[in-house]
């Protein structure tokens, strides 16, 4: 059957050659707060979910293994089975093991996906209409549409929106000329959607593809071209098979995890109907900035309330009603109309009907996601109108002009009404930061800001419709003006966070790289919160390397949900115990009464399904200690007088095994969601491991098929200038994936060698006999590298560790010492504390580990400048009635002159009972607090005695001229704390970089 796609005009060469560049430039310009990194990605799921998950994937890859188990959130879960991960996504693997998934990476990825989506839509329209100029206009409109702006925090939805136009374009090629190349191309994009995208869009999009395929086959069958139908069916089968191979890991993970997820059984309609598109959200069709972020007024989450595709695009799509449409336009148009109605959720019957009748559509929430397919229909219909513009206008000129004029009159009326209504709103505040000035105005003020650009663009569009020959460059400019201005404003609603990406990334970079041996302290001490990273307060364990029972994820194992929802007292009791603990308080489930559990009394309680034969005993002298830890397991040395029970606070899932002295032992399901073993008496080596032997094979099949297909498409094609970027891209992707998976060594292998090399170099300096303070979490595994040299282990990765560090330094005497970092970064506060006592002499490096010779400061020698000394004779008691000290206050502008310096707060305190001494850093403007942070001064286990604490922060960047910084110590607890000393010191940049 001959090609059904017409050839394009010669006049569109400029758009074919430079369309991608114009879309790229427009995106970078409109999203300038992100492209310049002046602002960060929006708070919420972006920072609390996508950054932590991808950070963990990068950590796993850089530790030399594929990410199977994440022990740091929700009591552990199989991250390879979490399809939001995305552990199986080739670009994620390529980035994770090379540059890593940092805040900068994710921010650049968002912009990249917007650009890729725009270019993909341009390609799709170019295939449909065979005019690159029309493709450029529609691709630009798509890149600047409201979907990307609204759903930035739903990052896998952004990935889907980027690749779906490419899949549709590849499928249209396949339906036009069924060949292996088209089937392979479509399979590559389908694999990207399956491994990295939101499966909501895959499920809905599958029905659209089926409709398009059936439509193409039916048309060919009616024309008598049955061989074409057979070829199409065969090539679609090849597409499906290749897609399954490329995403075999994802399919296996879904099949395996389904019995353990409540969600796979289908969602109740009330859950599925959450966060629809609403009537008030229709405002976004005109002025997306004006919908604001008031969820109560919107009737939905603000991220679900932006359906903006451009007023000009909507008009062009409406004109399709009065012209002839193609088969593809009709299918996509009808499908988009159904999806538009479904997006309103329970407000209309369509969504409930689809939820009940169509397989797969009961597995996801957020009806507003259907809006993407409505936007697709608008843009495809608009492209058809532009392609037929010259033939349509002679017959429909008056109708077209009337429609544009009516829309123009509507915008004028809304603008006039907004002018009248804005007097009843709070006045616009000219003071404040740019973020505050843009997000502060009320609704009608926002209309007054947004509407003039729309009005001007529509007026120009009315003139454009009058000219005889379409000027496509001018139309692209009008789309850029209208949609660029609207999206530039709307991004402040749902796509930007008011923080410095550089500052937050600096804090992330201070966290450990690779697995950290856990301290056997109550796991509840590792609760989520904003104290450490401030802008990130969920899934924090992914950064700190501390296993936690907290966490936020829609991927939750059934038993973990049962534990949290039906057994809250038992969960609270478990938080009083460490990651692994010994107990003889084991009861069968039949004798367990959830309401009778007292967390304080029953913290060691273990509930098992069946009684354990034989007596169990746990004595005070019994002990266990960590001997090995990585993401997929933990080994411990144990010493017990009698048989007892050892419980691991990780979620049970197929793949967990246990060994005692190298021999397999039976796992016992315990505490609803966890597991443990019966431990025999004596000294033993206990090991828990999570294994999934099939995963490497699935990964190999998936990546070999995907990368092989990409290389085949790139190189088996006619030579051309356009082929070179594709070939280079395929090679870079393949090389990055191979590097990520094949070049990294586990931390457990690397660290001992690095420490041995540092010890050798220390001996070569002539000062190798000095005491060594080793900052590490795995001192027992590294101690033998020092031989007879005195070495003391300490954890110095957090500011609150300074009390431990100070005690350790006292044990080393008054002479020079070596400070070594091996496996843990040194916290800036600890680094500052060392600078207050020592000057740094010699610095040695081996891999990521370092050793520094520290010499004590001479008598009278001071490090830094004391800005404030609030110490009092006899100290100052902080009690519930007077919980804070006097504050150091200074203009931020004056401090900012030392832009590379560090502000250090030093205090000596004696806490009692439940006292929680903290350092508060606040910024005030005209008496109003505009920025605030509270940092724990000491570790939670320090409750008695006199303890030193240090907090260090980069000098604050003034949010606005006239801002004042305040620093003070306060007690955030019910008991009292005595503050003996309180000083604020400025370490200049040069000192801080030593």
Image (tube, grey):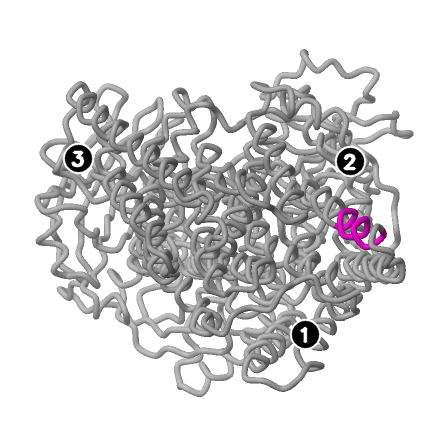
Q: Quadrant of residue 554?
A: top right
Residue at position x 50%, y 48% from top? 382
Mark 2 or mark 1, earlier in chain: 2
C-alpha span from label 2 to label 1: 32 Å
Residue at position x 58%, y 24% from top? 345
Disc 3 versus disc 1: nearer the observer: 1
Q: Quadrant of the N terminus?
A: bottom right
Looking at the picture, how far across and down is residue 681, in whole percent? 82, 42
**604 or 255, nearer to the observer:** 255
C-alpha span from label 2 to label 3: 60 Å
Residue 260, disc: 2
- Residue 216 counted in the magenta span: yes
> Secondary structure under badge 2?
helix
> Secondary structure under badge 1?
helix
Query: Is residue 327 depicted above or below 930 in this figure?
Result: below
Looking at the picture, how far across and down is residue 970, in whole percent? 26, 32
Residue lying furthest right in this view?
Answer: 613
Looking at the picture, how far across and down is residue 197, in whole percent? 62, 50
Q: Which residue is mark 3?
A: 874
Q: Quadrant of residue 920?
A: top left
**451 or 642, nearer to the observer:** 451
**Residue 693 visible (yes or no):** no
Q: Residues within 10 Å of mark 3 (few under 14, many from 20)?
A: few
**435 or 468, nearer to the observer:** 468
The reply to whether callout 2 and callout 3 are in contact (CB within 8 Å) is: no
> What span is in magenta?
213-221
Looking at the picture, how far across and down is residue 453, in whole percent? 26, 44
- Left or right of 556 on screen, residue 901: left
- Residue 129 counted in the magenta span: no
Residue at position x 28%, y 52% from top? 952
Q: Residues within 10 Å of mark 2 (few under 14, many from 20)?
A: some
Residue 742, disc: 1
């Amino acid at each position: 059957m001959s090609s059904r796609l017409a050839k394009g005009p010669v006049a569109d060469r400029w758009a074919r050659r430079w369309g991608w560049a114009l879309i790229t430039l427009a995106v970078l310009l409109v999203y300038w707060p992100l492209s310049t990194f002046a602002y960060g990605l929006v708070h919420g799921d972006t920072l609390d979910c996508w950054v932590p998950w991808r950070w963990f994937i990068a950590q796993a890859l850089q530790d030399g293994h594929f990410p199977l188990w994440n022990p740091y959130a929700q009591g552990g879960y199989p991250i390879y089975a979490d399809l939001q991960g995305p552990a199986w996504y080739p670009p994620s693997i390529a980035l994770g093991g090379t540059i890593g998934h940092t805040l900068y990476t994710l921010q650049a990825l968002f912009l990249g996906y917007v650009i890729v989506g725009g270019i993909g839509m341009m390609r799709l329209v170019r295939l449909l209409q065979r005019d690159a100029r029309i493709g450029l206009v529609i691709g630009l409109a798509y890149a600047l549409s409201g979907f990307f702006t609204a759903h930035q925090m739903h990052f896998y939805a952004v990935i889907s929106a980027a690749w779906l136009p490419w899949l549709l374009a590849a499928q249209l090629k396949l339906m036009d000329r069924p060949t292996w190349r088209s089937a392979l191309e479509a399979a590559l994009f389908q694999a990207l959607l399956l491994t990295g995208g939101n499966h909501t869009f895959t499920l809905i999009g599958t029905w659209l593809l089926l409709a398009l395929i059936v439509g193409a086959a039916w048309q060919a069958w009616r024309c008598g071209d049955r061989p074409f139908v057979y070829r199409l069916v065969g090539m679609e089968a090849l597409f499906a098979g290749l897609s399954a191979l490329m995403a075999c890991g994802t399919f296996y993970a879904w099949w395996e995890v389904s019995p353990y997820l409540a969600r796979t059984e289908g969602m109740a309609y009330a859950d599925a109907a959450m966060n629809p598109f609403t009537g008030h959200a229709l405002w976004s069709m005109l002025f997306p900035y004006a919908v604001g972020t008031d969820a109560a007024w919107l009737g939905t989450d603000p991220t679900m309330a932006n359906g903006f595709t451009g007023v000009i695009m909507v008009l062009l799509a409406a004109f399709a009603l009065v012209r002839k449409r193609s088969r593809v336009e009709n299918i996509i148009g009808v499908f988009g109309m159904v999806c538009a109605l479904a997006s309103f959720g329970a407000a209309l019957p369509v969504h409930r009907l689809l939820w009940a009748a169509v397989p797969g559509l009961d597995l996801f929430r957020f009806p507003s996601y259907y809006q993407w397919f409505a936007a697709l229909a608008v843009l495809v219909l608009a492209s058809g109108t532009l392609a037929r513009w010259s033939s349509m206008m002679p017959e429909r000129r008056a109708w077209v002009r009337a429609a544009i004029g009516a829309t123009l009159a509507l915008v004028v009326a809304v603008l006039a009404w907004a002018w009248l209504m804005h007097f009843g709103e709070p006045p616009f505040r000219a003071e404040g930061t740019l973020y505050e000035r843009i997000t502060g105005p009320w609704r009608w003020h926002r209309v007054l800001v947004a509407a003039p650009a729309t009005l001007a663009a529509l007026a120009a569009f009315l003139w454009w419709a009058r000219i005889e020959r379409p000027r496509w460059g001018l139309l692209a400019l009008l789309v850029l003006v209208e949609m660029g201005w609207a999206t530039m404003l709307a991004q402040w609603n749902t796509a930007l966070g008011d923080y410095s990406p550089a500052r937050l990334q600096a804090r992330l970079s201070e966290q450990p790289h690779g697995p950290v041996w856990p301290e056997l302290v109550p796991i509840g001490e590792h609760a989520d919160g904003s104290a450490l990273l401030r802008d990130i307060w969920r899934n924090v364990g992914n950064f700190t390397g501390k296993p936690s029972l907290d966490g936020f994820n829609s991927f939750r194992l059934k038993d973990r949900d049962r534990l949290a929802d039906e057994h809250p007292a038992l969960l609270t009791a478990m938080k009083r115990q460490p990651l692994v603990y010994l107990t003889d308080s084991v009861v069968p489930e039949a004798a367990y009464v959830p309401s009778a559990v007292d967390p304080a009394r029953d913290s060691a309680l273990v509930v098992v399904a069946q009684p354990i034969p034989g007596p169990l005993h746990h004595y005070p002298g019994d002990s266990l200690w960590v001997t090995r830890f990585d993401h997929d397991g933990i080994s411990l040395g144990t010493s017990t007088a009698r048989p007892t029970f050892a419980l691991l606070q990780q979620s049970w899932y197929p793949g967990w095994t246990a060994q005692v002295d190298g021999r397999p032992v039976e796992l016992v399901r315990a505490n609803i969601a966890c597991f443990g073993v019966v431990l025999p008496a004596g000294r033993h080596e206990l090991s828990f491991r999570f294994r999934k032997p099939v995963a490497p094979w699935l990964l190999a099949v998936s990546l070999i098929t995907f990368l092989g297909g990409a290389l085949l498409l790139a190189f088996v094609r006619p030579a051309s200038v356009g082929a070179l970027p594709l070939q280079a891209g395929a090679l870079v992707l393949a090389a990055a994936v191979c590097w990520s998976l094949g070049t990294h060594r586990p931390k457990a292998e690397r660290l001992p060698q690095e420490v041995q090399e540092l010890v050798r170099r220390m001996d070569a300096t002539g000062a190798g006999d000095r005491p060594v303070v080793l900052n590490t979490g795995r001192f027992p595994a590294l101690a033998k590298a020092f031989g007879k040299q005195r070495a003391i282990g300490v954890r110095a990765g957090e500011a609150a560790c300074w009390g431990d560090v100070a005690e350790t330094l006292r044990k080393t005497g008054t002479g020079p010492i070596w400070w070594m970092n091996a496996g843990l970064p040194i916290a800036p506060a600890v680094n500052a504390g060392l600078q207050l006592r020592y000057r740094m002499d010699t610095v040695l490096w081996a891999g990521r580990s370092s050793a520094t010779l520290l010499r004590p400061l001479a008598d009278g020698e001071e490090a830094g400048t004391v800005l404030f000394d609030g110490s009092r004779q006899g100290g100052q008691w902080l009690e519930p009635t007077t919980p804070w000290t006097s504050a150091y206050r200074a203009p931020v502008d004056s401090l900012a002159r030392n832009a590379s310096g560090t502000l250090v707060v030093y205090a000596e305190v004696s806490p009692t009972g439940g006292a929680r001494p903290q350092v508060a850093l606040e910024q005030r403007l005209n008496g109003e607090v505009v920025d605030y942070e509270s940092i724990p001064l000491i570790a939670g286990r320090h409750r008695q005695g006199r303890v030193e604490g240090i907090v260090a922060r980069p000098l604050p960047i003034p949010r606005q001229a006239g801002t004042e910084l305040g620093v003070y110590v306060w007690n955030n607890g019910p008991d009292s704390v005595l503050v003996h000393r309180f000083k604020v010191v400025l370490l200049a940049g040069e000192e801080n970089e030593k």
